[in-house]
Image (tube, rainbow, N blue to C red):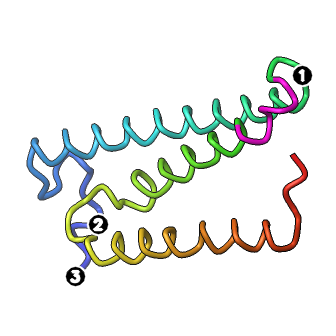
């Protein structure tokens, strides 16, 4: 019943092309993970040191967060793959509704003290 589970990976039903694709995808995910760690370190360094001016620190960290969010969506949530049209449409429409709503609430409540 489970004879194929005892076979090694090399003897599986995957073709050589499929194995290459999987290795390529793993390599991409490791590189993106390292990039995200680097972006996180840059955010911490922006706060811990005076490399980034205080007036630009919050927008700088926000830009890094948006980049990390996009990398998370595309590489770890697999939004770059096919057949995610509806999920992409809902997320983009949610962003277009959320961002102006938060900005309007910040203006109404006087949260922007920059």
Write down the residue under mark 1: 49
| Residues tagged 3 and 1 counted as in contact (Cβ below 8 A) | no
Q: Is residue 2 above or below residue 16?
A: below
- Residue under the image location 10 percent in, 42 percent down: 16
Residue 72: x and y in percent read 50, 53
What secondary structure is found at the residue carrying circle 1?
loop
- Residue under the image location 86 percent in, 45 percent down: 114
Write down the residue under mark 3: 1
CA distance for labels 3 and 1: 61 Å
Tell whether position 54 is magenta. Answer: yes
Q: Which segment did they paint magenta? A: 53-59
CA distance for labels 2 and 3: 9 Å
Residue 38: x and y in percent read 64, 30
The quarter of the displayed image where residue 43 is located: top right
Of the two numbered discs 3 and 1 on the same chain, state the one appearing first in sequence: 3
Q: Is residue 6 above or below residue 50?
A: below
- Residue under the image location 37 percent in, 37 percent down: 28
Q: Is residue 5 left or right of residue 71?
A: left
What secondary structure is found at the residue carrying circle 3?
loop
Write down the residue under mark 2: 5
- Residue under the image location 17 percent in, 55 percent down: 12
Residue 11: x and y in percent read 16, 50
Residue 104: x and y in percent read 70, 71
Q: Main secondary structure of the magenta part?
A: helix
Q: Which one is in front in this view, the residue at disc 2 or the one at disc 1?
A: 1
CA distance for labels 2 and 1: 53 Å
């Amino acid at each position: 019943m489970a004879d194929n589970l005892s076979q090694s990976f090399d003897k599986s039903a995957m073709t050589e092309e499929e194995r290459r694709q999987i290795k390529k995808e793993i390599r991409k995910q490791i590189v993106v993970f390292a990039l995200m760690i680097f972006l996180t370190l840059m955010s911490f360094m922006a706060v811990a040191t005076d490399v980034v001016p205080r007036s630009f620190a919050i927008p700088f960290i926000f830009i890094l967060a948006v980049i990390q969010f996009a990398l998370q969506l595309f590489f770890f949530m697999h939004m770059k793959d096919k057949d995610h049209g509806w999920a992409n449409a809902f997320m983009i429409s949610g962003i277009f509704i959320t961002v102006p709503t938060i900005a309007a609430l910040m203006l109404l409540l006087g949260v922007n003290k920059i």
